[in-house]
Amino acid sequence: MTSFHSFFIVIIISHVFIPLYFSPIHGNTDVGFSINLIRKTSPQRVRGLSTMSETPQSPVGAYLGHYLMELSIGTPPFKIYGIADTGSDLIWTQCVPCNNCYKQLNPMFDPIKSSSYSNISCHSNSCHKLDTGVCSPQKQCNYTYAYASASITQGVLAQETVTLTSTTGTSVLLKDVVFGCGHDNKGSFNDHEMGIIGLGGGPVSFISQMGRSFGGKRFSQCLVPFHTDVNVHSIMSFGKGSKVSGEGVVSTPLVAKDDKTPYFVTLLGISVGETYLHYNGSSGNVEKGNMFLDSGTPPTIFPTQLYDRVVAEVKNQVAMEPTVDDPDLGSQLCYRTKNNLPGPMLTVHFEGANVTLEPIQTLISPKDGVFCLGFTNTSSDVGIYGNFAQSNYLIGFDLEAQVVSFKPTDCTKNT
């Protein structure tokens, strides 16, 4: 099992997109998409939704700190499992030929075997929606897309039809979806991950390309806790039917910035038990949009000045001595115990929304008998609300109303 310390180092801000520019690469791709959802049957396909009560959904499961969405690409459909990532935009998968790619257990997608693919011209508007789209000698739109973890994918942009399955079992088509067929992919990927499904707010993300096709530009997720059985899946819903409502729901405004990809919100402070810690360490105003939600980053990342105060207060409230003699754990705050660590309840105070976190969401077990605080620090003024903390909440991203909503939920039963 990967140690918690090295796990943080590898994936700490793994799927925050950083634009980089490289020489173009070359490759041929033919691809079509269909998201294979809850039902295993394949009813007759239709265009659009006949009623807004039909909500497109996708199964999502946990594996080594990431959440994998099951998609089917191409005609005939070919299953892939891509990281569900609200911190980036591009949809991509590893494609044949792939001589410089990371190892994956499942077969790679072979674009030649799909009949529904079309190349994107390097002169098209779709190519220029991705900042790193460049022209190949064949006039194809080649791309390079890199992440803060130093992971990188290079390949060809193409257009395809995405087929989603609704809650009633009806197939729903989305045409001309832009995605990347990756022929040169490197980085901190494990062998179960076949690519990334970008769910951010930028123009090439799945959410932006979905637009209002399903009755609204919105989606919801329910992530199962870390170490949940890999066979247990929750669901991600899209469109009007994904609205999060009912008892216990709290909402916080999304904050618009020049960078359209991240879902920025405003963190006012955090409570450890009954002790309130202001974001800035004082009672002054905080900058709007000082944190964003990222399902592709496991730990929650605070600016150092806040992180240090949170760690000190957790130590103060846990009646045990932290582990200091395990080199695998590095500087993380960890405790050794044979039982679940009775850690304090934490409350994250977003603007207009108090989100309570139980130990299952904040104390992560990297190995038997050890529990570590699922936070780390950054020198940046902007933090990241990671997927450990997002687990066991039904979280709705409503880009129409510009709010994020949280509802406490047992996500292992949200199937």
Image (cartoon, grey):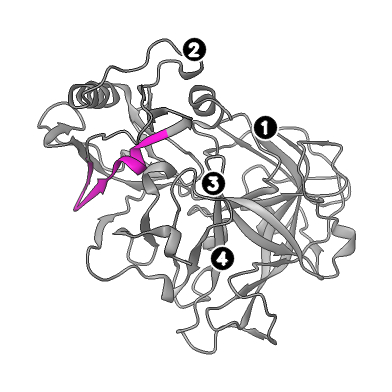
Q: CA distance from mark 4 to mark 1?
A: 26 Å
Instruction: Verify whether residue 210 appears in magenta.
Output: no
Residue type indicated by callout 4: Ser
Q: Earlier in the sequence, mark 4 or mark 1?
A: 4
Above or below 357: residue 408: below
Instruction: Name the side, left or right, on which 255 lies relative to 31.
Output: left
| Foreground disc of the pair 4, 1 | 4
Query: How crowded is the residue under tag 1: few (<14 C-alpha within 10 Å), some, or many (20+)?
Result: some
Instruction: Name the side, left or right, on which 312 lies relative to 118.
Output: left
Q: Residue at x 38, y 12 (%)?
A: 324
- Disc 4 designates what residue? 58
Q: Earlier in the sequence, mark 3 or mark 1?
A: 3
Instruction: Name the side, left or right, on which 47 lies relative to 228.
Output: right
Q: Quarter of the image holding residue 44?
A: bottom right
- Disc 3 designates what residue? 88
Residue type indicated by callout 3: Ser
Q: Earlier in the sequence, mark 2 or mark 4?
A: 4
- Disc 1 designates what residue? 187
Q: Give the quarter of the figure containing the N terminus.
A: top right
- Disc 2 designates what residue? 327
Q: Secondary structure at mark 4?
A: strand
Q: CA distance from mark 4 to mark 3?
A: 18 Å
Can residue 221 be seen in this snapshot?
A: no
Numbered range of the magenta stretch: 346-364
Q: Quarter of the image holding residue 69?
A: bottom right
